[in-house]
Amino acid sequence: LRKDSVSLERGGGGSGSSALGGPSADAASYRVLAFEDSYNIRAMLEDGGVTFGSFHQRWDSRSPVEALEEFGAEFGAVDVLLLDYYLPPITGFKVLQQANEAVRAGRLQQPRHIIGMSSVNACNVELLTEGADTAFVKWDVIMWEGWARTQGSGSGNKEQYLDTACCCRCCCGG
């Protein structure tokens, strides 16, 4: 991890594994859903040598429970839920709250792994308090030990992943 990066883990365990022992046997087939409005997370993961079975990125947080349901209908249950904090129109924290409520109501299956990936560590701490298993400064999410990997050549240059068509321009300078 770079000096400006902190990896945080939720204490006390939880329904998702923090993957401290490395990737599970099925990690290369993980179904990944990311809520992120500024950076191309798929490109970031692939450049870092991360492999997965399916991937979808939501560029906003409209109707998050419905997005999780649609993803589940198409690909199966979410294995890895990646959450940015600052998203239009509601925060990743609110997305996680709504997802947790839907799980408790039996509407959704609990994602196996929930990872906060804000560029602000205080926001990652909030995601952990709502149930994220771990959290990273956004461009270091490839460092999670639960990913299956190939040999990646990631440069670590966060600007190369910035979506220049960012819809809000308030949080990323895009």
Image: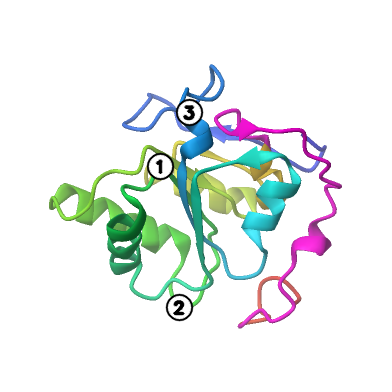
Cα gap from disc 1 to disc 2, whole angstroms: 24 Å
State the image quarter where residue 161 is shown. bottom right
In the foreground, 11 or 74: 74
- Decide: marks 2, 3 in contact (CB < 8 A)? no
The residue that disc 3 covers is 18
**Mark earlier in primary sequence (2, 3):** 3
Residue 120, located in which quarter of the rendered image? bottom right
Contact between labelled residues 1 and 3, with CB atoms less than 8 Å apart: no
What secondary structure is the stretch in magenta mostly built from?
loop
Which residue is under mark 2? 89
Quadrant where the C terminus sits is bottom right
- Between circles 3 and 1, the one closer to the viewer is 1
Q: Is residue 110 magenta?
A: no
Specify whether 92 is left or right of 169.
left
Label 3: how many Cα within 10 Å (few below 14, some 14–19, many 20+): many
- Name the residue located 66 percent from the left edge and 32 percent from the top edge: 149
Residue 97: percent from left, percent from top: 32, 56
Please report the residue visible at 52 percent of the width from the left and 70 percent of the height from the top.
87
Rounded to the nearest angstrom, the CA distance separating label 3 from label 1 is 12 Å
Q: Secondary structure at mark 1?
A: loop
Percent position of residue 66, x then y: 28, 68
Mark 1 or 2: in front is 1
The mark nearer the N terminus, 1 or 2, is: 1
Provide the residue span drawn in magenta. 143-167
Residue drawn at the location 61% of the way across and 83% of the way down: 167
Circle 1 residue:
79
Q: Report whether residue 152 is seen.
A: yes
Q: Amino acid at mark 3?
A: Ser
Q: Is residue 164 magenta?
A: yes
Instruction: Name which residue type carries label 1.
Output: Asp
| Residue 36, x across and y down, in percent | 56, 64
